[in-house]
Amino acid sequence: MSHAQTNPIVELADVHLAYGPTEVLKGIDLSVARGQTVSIIGPSGSGKSTILRCINALVAPQTGRISVNGVRVDQMRSEAERIKLRQKIGIVFQQYNLFPHLSVLDNITIAPTRILGVNKADAERHARDLLARVRLSEKASVYPGQLSGGQQQRVAIARALAMRPDLVLFDEVTSALDPETVGEVLAVIRDLVKEGMTSILVTHEMRFAEEISDVVVFTENGRIVDQGPPEAIFQTSTNARIRRFVNGLAGARASLEDGEGI
């Protein structure tokens, strides 16, 4: 993992962020190498999603250094700079945020044509390739309201990929989905990871994080408690809090799958 330290695509150093008296991030250090998959896990309110928003310049820390592709995100002052950054960072949210009045194909092509100036034919050709990758080739002409939640989320992933990003951020992308559709979204992310897409995921899907990640980061109370290879976090961690969290979520998932508490 030394490669992540010497050639990072994303680097956060001593990042602090507060809203008024509430400290959200309390000195975050994180390094992600090109081609790596990093999963951020931890209890709700621990700062996981805020880390992604800092990387994408959706929020600005009070102190600390953030760089993406060598560009200092924390020093950006204009919206034009932030827009340029986001052209190279795809982000997929918990809510799909698709345009309901546009077809699936138009949802995917609108940003490349309007922001990047890609001609419509090329944008549509790429969009159809992406729909095949997310296993929705037959849905190009339908509208978001005609799709299941899992299908809409896969369209949202295709839309993020349409900008040909260097990095994709996934922010709890399965938490709003029916359990039956979670698997189809995870399968798409698994394929992207295998293809080498640099990815940072905030997730409660512990088994999935363990399977696909190069590095797993555990956060709590605005700090990174530990980070390392999946087995170091999920299997051999000596940190009692991490073991309790991982085992608790695994038990809850098993109960749900067994039909308990439904």
Image: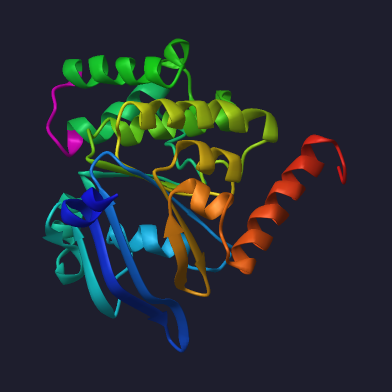
Residue at the farthest bottom position: 21
Q: Which residues are magenta?
A: 114-120
Which corner quadrant of the image does residue 5 belong to? bottom left
- Majority secondary structure in the magenta region: loop
The question of residue 78 being in magenta is answered with: no
Please state, as top left, top right, bottom left or bottom right, where the C terminus lies in the image.
Answer: top right
The question of residue 116 being in magenta is answered with: yes
Is 202 displayed left or right of 10 in the figure? right
Count of numbered badges drawn on the protein: 0
Is 66 displayed left or right of 24 in the figure? left
Q: Which residue is depicted at the point 45% across and 42% down? A: 97
93 to 155, vertically: above or below: below
83 to 24, vertically: above or below: above
The answer to whether any part of residue 233 appears in the image is yes
The answer to whether any part of residue 77 appears in the image is no
Which corner quadrant of the image does residue 140 belong to? top left
Q: Which residue is depicted at the point 56% across and 68% down? A: 45
Is 11 displayed left or right of 47 in the figure? left
Frontmost residue, 227 versus 24: 227
Frontmost residue, 144 versus 132: 132
Residue at the farthest top position: 138
Q: Which residue is depicted at the point 15% across and 67% down? A: 76
Is 259 displayed left or right of 117 in the figure? right
Residue 90, how many percent across, how many down? 31, 42
Residue 178, how many percent across, how many down? 67, 35
Residue 75, how many percent across, how many down? 15, 71
Q: Which residue is depicted at the point 29% across and 80% down? A: 62
Residue 6, how many percent across, how many down? 16, 55
247 to 195, vertically: above or below: below
108 to 216, vertically: above or below: above
